[in-house]
């Protein structure tokens, strides 16, 4: 069986209050965020939490994602960054390294594919993930705890909405972050 899910991130101000979400259907989704983060952090965290939530099942994972940064990070750039001591081709350190290392660990032994979908054009799953990620960011903007969602059936306890160690230690990248596009 293949699980098809959408993953998305949101940041108000980029950086600013940030959220993440993955979505399969109205009964199977999760969201969270931070008081201060970037869109790329949210996008990465959504994918990470999707891998974690589905780690207990032996199904293929098909991830719909509107972030070329995330897709390229996981499918193209990460192996080269690892070989270079987590440095990009220009010698600069990889941004969002804690989240990327956690994804690297979470994907070991997993069967997955990514599919790029254009964001904000009415794609049902992408829109549902976007609404939840933005809702988490807006909750942090208001000083509230976001709706964490029901999670995935049988998964370990869903991540709470508090700041993760990766987010609290991360240095937000610039909003445009063109250096992230540097290959190996």
Image (cartoon, rainbow, N blue to C red):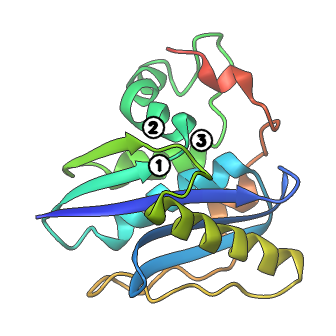
Q: Indicate which disc residue 65 carries.
A: 1
Task: Please tell me whether mark 2 or mark 3 is closer to you in this view.
Answer: 2
Q: Categorize mark 1 by other alpha carbons within 10 Å: few (<14), some (14-19), many (20+).
A: many
Checking the image for residue 71, the label placed there is 2
Quarter of the view holding residue 53: bottom left
Identify residue for label 3: 97
Q: Are marks 1 and 2 in contact (CB under 8 Å)?
A: yes
Give the structural element (helix, strand or loop) at label 3: helix
Q: Which part of the image, by quadrant, shows the N terminus?
A: bottom left
Residue 102 in percent (x, y) is at 46, 52
Residue in view at x 55 percent, y 42 percent: 67
Q: CA distance from mark 1 to mark 2?
A: 7 Å
In front: 64, or 88? 64
Residue 35: where, in percent of width, then height?
A: 82, 69
Mark closer to the chain start, 2 or 3: 2
Front position in the image: 118 or 144: 118
The crowd level at tag 2 (other Cα within 10 Å; few <14, some 14-19, many 20+) is many
- Which numbered disc flags the more N-terminal residue, 3 or 1? 1
Name which of mark 1 and mark 2 comes first in the sequence.
1
């Amino acid at each position: 069986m293949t699980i098809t899910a959408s993953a998305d991130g949101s940041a108000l101000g980029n950086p600013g209050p940030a959220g993440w979400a993955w979505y399969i259907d109205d009964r199977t989704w999760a969201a969270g965020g931070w008081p201060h983060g970037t869109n790329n952090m949210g996008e990465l965290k959504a994918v990470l939490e999707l891998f974690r939530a589905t780690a207990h099942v032996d199904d293929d994972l098909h991830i719909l994602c509107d972030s070329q940064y995330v897709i390229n990070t996981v499918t193209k750039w990460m192996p080269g960054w690892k070989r270079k001591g987590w440095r990009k081709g220009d010698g600069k350190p990889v941004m969002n390294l804690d989240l990327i290392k956690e994804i690297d660990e979470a994907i070991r032994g997993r069967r997955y594919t990514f599919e790029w979908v254009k964001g904000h054009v009415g794609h049902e799953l992408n829109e549902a993930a976007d609404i939840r990620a933005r809702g988490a960011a807006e909750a942090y903007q208001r000083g509230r705890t976001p709706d964490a969602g029901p999670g995935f059936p049988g998964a370990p306890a869903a991540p709470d909405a508090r700041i993760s160690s990766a987010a609290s230690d991360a240095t937000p990248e610039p909003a445009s972050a063109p250096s992230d596009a540097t290959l190996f």
